[in-house]
Image: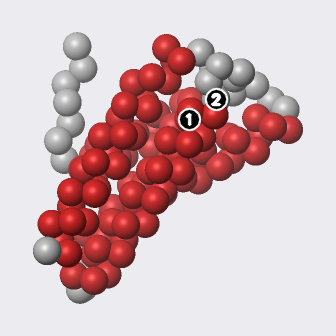
Amino acid sequence: MEEKIYNLKDRSFVFAKRILEIADLLSRGHSCDIIRNQLIRSGTSIGANIEEADGSLTRKDFTNKMAIARKEAKETRYWLRLLIPKYLEQKVIEKDIKEVEELISILSAIINKTKA
């Protein structure tokens, strides 16, 4: 059984690496190339924005970077769901979809708490 990572920066980094692995599973072809590029951009951007938020100078900037990370996570969820069943079987990426949904929930909680 895999050990759960609780540090958000580490968790989003591991998720980004998994996104790159999923991208490598996709066949070559026009539609897959488009999906692959979008998936890589959004899936790796989550952690990048979390890292940027960590260096924020103001609460507003922090909240904005976390909101961008959440938007990227939602986009990533979309691209992952689009892969099923035409490009990948659900069992291959169902844990990844669950992980991105958890990231969305965590980011939403952080945003809500920061705004309060």
Q: Residue furthest right?
A: 30
User: What residue do we see at 62% from left, 24% from top?
Assistant: 84
User: What residue do we see at 32% from left, 46% from top?
Assistant: 103
Q: Is residue 69 above or below residue 53?
A: above
Q: Is residue 37 above or below residue 55?
A: above
User: What residue do we see at 28% from left, 57% from top?
Assistant: 108
Q: Quadrant of residue 48?
A: bottom left
Q: Judging from the image, what secondary structure is the residue with disc 2 in? A: loop
| Residue 21 is at least partly visible in this image | yes
- Name the image quarter holding the C terminus: bottom left
- Name the image quarter holding the N terminus: top left
Q: Are marks 2 and 1 in contact (CB under 8 Å)?
A: yes
User: What residue do we see at 36% from left, 75% from top?
Assistant: 64
Percent position (x, y) of residue 97?
A: 44, 32
Q: Is residue 33 above or below residue 42?
A: above
Compute the Cα span from label 2 to label 1: 5 Å
Badge 1: how crowded within 10 Å, few (<14), some, or many (20+)?
many
| Residue 44 is at least partly visible in this image | no
Report the front residue among 13 and 103: 103
Badge 2: how crowded within 10 Å, few (<14), some, or many (20+)?
some
Q: Is residue 90 above or below residue 49?
A: above
Percent position (x, y) of residue 47?
A: 39, 55
Amino acid type of the residue that numbered disc 2 sits on in the rendered structure: Leu
Percent position (x, y) of residue 80?
A: 56, 35
Amino acid type of the residue that numbered disc 1 sits on in the rendered structure: Leu
The residue tagged 2 is 83
Q: Judging from the image, what secondary structure is the residue with disc 1 in? A: helix
In the displayed structure, does residue 39 sit left or right of residue 37? left
The residue tagged 1 is 80
In the displayed structure, does residue 48 sit left or right of residue 75? left
Label drawn at residue 108: none
